[in-house]
Image (spheres, rainbow, N blue to C red):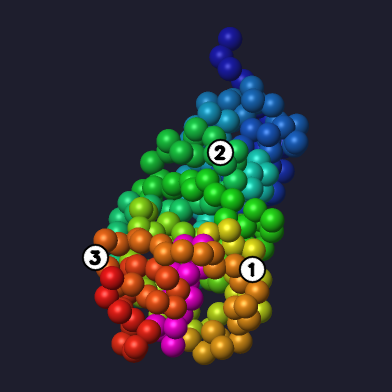
Amino acid sequence: MPDQAPSQGKLSQLLAEWPKGAVAVQSWFDEREIPRQLADRYCRFGWLRRIGRGAYARLHETVEWTGGLYALQQQLGLPLHAGGKTALELQGYAHYLPMRAGGVKWLFGPPKAKPPRWFLKRDWGDRPRCMATNLFQSSPGLALTKKKIEDYEIRLSAPERAILELLDQLPESQGFEEAQQLMESLATLRPELVQQLLENCRSIKAKRLFLLLAEICGHQWLSALKLDVVELGKGKRLLVKGGHFDRKFQISTPYQRHDKEHIPA
């Protein structure tokens, strides 16, 4: 006997609750009494499409990596967020930087928060990459915010947190020149939030770079910080051989001050 089309009653309710542009996972279907067998039949009859094991999209809808991240955050409950340069891009701070097709989109989370295979292996156009980090281990949710995309929201780093995440990636995964350009765009950071982040950040390198770049860029909010309670570690940090050594923050980088605080390495 030919396979009979299933009733569309549950499907109609599902589509009404399903944000446009988002991926939906099987556990979310299960909560709505749609087992895998029924989801498979919806796909066979051309009402849904499978984009990976246990992950679905509307039939004629293009889903971006952000729609996949929404499913990871809201349906699977994974403590992942868009951070670093990607969070700054999404909030309009990198509009003057060249945008490359198929560029890396950075996700941050604790080491055990690993996305499912369907998210990592799918060709989104862009390339999501997960950075396992405990940069703010004592306050993991500090300075996270939300951004609306189509009919759904994703969790991402506020600019104050994103720039520290980016600086922690230097020089392995991010470039010094882009980092300085991005810092130059951050003239309106909230000093009270910056203070909290600096006090909770575990990366000495990121904090020293952050403060050095903020001084080079001349940001006004820097004067409101209480640096005597920020742990900046001891000893020198060499990030670039033959770079410029900054006496104040004891770090060697490509960045050069135009005052007496700077001497060559």
What's the CA distance linking mark 1 and mark 3?
30 Å
- Residue 263 as seen in the image, left or right of residue 20: left
Could you tell me which residue is drawn at 53 percent across and 59 percent down? 203
Magenta part of the chain: 204-218
Q: Which amino acid does label 2 sit on?
A: Lys
State the image coordinates of residue 54 (x, y, percent, origin top left): 58, 30
Q: Which comes sooner in the sequence, label 1 or label 3? A: 1
Q: Which numbered mark, 1 or 2, is in the foreground of this view?
A: 1
Q: Which comes sooner in the sequence, label 1 or label 2? A: 2
Identify whether 97 is placed above or below 103.
Answer: below
Magenta run includes residue 213: yes
State the image coordinates of residue 34 (x, y, percent, origin top left): 70, 31
Question: Which numbered marker is on residue 114?
Answer: 2
State the image coordinates of residue 138 (x, y, percent, origin top left): 69, 56
What's the CA distance linking mark 1 and mark 2?
27 Å
Question: Which numbered marker is on residue 199?
Answer: 1
Asked if the residue at tag 2 contacts the one at tag 3, i.e. Cβ–Cβ closer than 8 Å, the answer is no
Question: Which numbered marker is on residue 242?
Answer: 3
Could you tell me which residue is drawn at 42 percent across and 38 percent down? 122
The quadrant the N terminus occupies is top right
Q: Which numbered mark, 3 or 2, is in the foreground of this view?
A: 3
Dot 3 lies on which element? loop
- Residue 174 as seen in the image, left or right of residue 30: left
Q: Residues within 10 Å of mark 2 (few under 14, many from 20)?
A: some
